């Protein structure tokens, strides 16, 4: 046994340890290991050449911005079914539509769900975006404190009225006021977020609010709000919520954009065909039990899911916004130039939807 261990026990050259001298004897083993690694690398490369690399679009993560609202839930549902569409979705939730637009401008999102006014305002100020679809209509009510005595829009004169700044509800409020000759100077407008509007109405800090869904349905169901009107009798009609894509994503990742729109149509159709599936997802997954089934049904009745939108509708909304100075657009954009429905139409045709 002595000769076998002696080389490792002898002192090596000056400055080298016995351990280093011992490791030198394992060089052939290391060369074998290196040859094994090279062989594995060559085999992997051969496999890629033989079967082809996966398309970049299949690996692309699509970043989506959305709002925590009942009628926006179809967009959130895309994440739940994304794998079946061959995509991955990174979903982010924002407080309001203008925040989604800012994230798109910052390059943080590829797709965003907004009310039309946020998209119109963004495009009117040079944002490189396209409207590529619509997913819900309506979603607004003018509510008053039950004992306020407010019965019509004209009764808002001299009152405190809450609304979310930059929202489609602000646009509709302006249009309704314009019909009866009221201006912002004739009342006190208080700007609050959607949840805060309900709290202000509950505590009677305001006399009325122009609210979204499901918050308006909750105010009615819980007795602290009375519906005055659904504001769909202006040139806008029932506003359609918009799905927006950055120009960079639309033009630079056409295959990923196509897959996303197919998944969007699939998600919307699921909710349109199966209201119970929509109810379960919204009440349990989105609102975590804070919204009852009855409140969801009331909200949905005023903000049904859809797959319909038109450039004409966006143009009419743009015109109303420009008339009342909402959105502060440097140059209102012509809807025909930036409403791109080719991907939506193709996805609907593929799914057998007219």
Image (cartoon, rainbow, N blue to C red):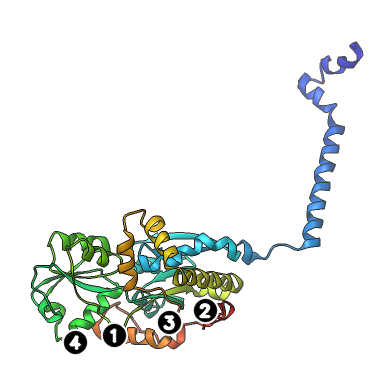
Name the foreground residue: 110 vs 284: 284
Q: Name the residue under label 1.
A: 320
Residue 344's tag is 2
Residue pictured at 39% horizontal, 58% vertical:
286
Q: Which comes before the other along the chain, label 2 or label 1?
A: 1
Query: In this image, 63 relative to 224: left or right?
Result: right
Q: Name the residue under label 4.
A: 179
Q: Can residue 270 be seen in this view?
A: yes
Residue 99, quarter of the rendered image: bottom left
Q: Which comes before the other along the chain, label 3 or label 4?
A: 4
27 up-or-down from 147: above or below: above
Q: Is residue 106 visible?
A: no
Q: Which comes before the other along the chain, label 4 or label 1?
A: 4
- Residue farthest top in this picture: 2
Residue 321, quarter of the rendered image: bottom left
Whole-angstrom CA distance, mark 2 to mark 1, is 26 Å
């Amino acid at each position: 046994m002595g000769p076998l261990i002696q080389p490792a026990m002898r002192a090596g050259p000056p400055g080298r340890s016995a351990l280093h001298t011992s490791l030198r004897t394992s060089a052939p083993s290391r060369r074998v290991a290196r040859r094994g690694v090279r062989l594995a690398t060559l085999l992997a490369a051969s496999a890629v050449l033989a079967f082809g690399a996966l398309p970049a679009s299949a690996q692309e993560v699509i970043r989506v911005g959305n709002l925590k609202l009942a009628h926006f839930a179809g967009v959130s549902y895309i994440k739940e079914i994304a794998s079946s569409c061959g995509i991955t979705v990174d979903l982010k939730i924002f407080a309001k539509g203008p925040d989604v637009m800012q994230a798109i401008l910052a390059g943080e999102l590829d797709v965003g769900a907004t009310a039309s006014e946020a998209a119109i305002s963004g495009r009117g100020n040079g944002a490189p975006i396209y409207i590529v679809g619509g997913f819900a209509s309506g979603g607004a009510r003018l509510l008053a404190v039950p004992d306020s005595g407010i019965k019509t829009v004209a009764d808002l004169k001299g009152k405190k009225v809450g609304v979310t700044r930059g929202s489609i509800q602000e646009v509709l409020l302006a249009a309704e006021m314009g019909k009866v000759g009221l201006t912002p100077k004739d009342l006190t407008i208080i700007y609050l977020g959607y949840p805060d509007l309900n709290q202000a109405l509950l505590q009677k800090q305001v006399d009325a609010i122009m609210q979204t869904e499901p918050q308006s349905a909750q105010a009615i169901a819980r007795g602290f709000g009375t519906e005055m009107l659904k504001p769909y009798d202006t040139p806008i009609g029932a506003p359609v919520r918009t799905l927006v894509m950055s120009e960079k994503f639309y033009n630079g990742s056409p295959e990923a954009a196509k897959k996303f729109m197919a998944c969007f149509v699939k998600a919307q159709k699921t909710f349109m065909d199966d209201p119970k599936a929509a109810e379960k997802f919204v009440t349990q997954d989105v609102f975590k039990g804070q919204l009852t089934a009855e409140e969801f049904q009331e909200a949905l009745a005023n903000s049904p899911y859809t797959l319909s939108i038109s450039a004409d509708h966006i143009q009419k909304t743009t015109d109303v916004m420009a008339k009342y100075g909402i959105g502060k657009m440097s140059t209102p954009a012509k809807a025909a130039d930036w409403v791109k429905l080719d991907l939506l139409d193709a996805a609907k045709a593929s799914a057998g939807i007219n």
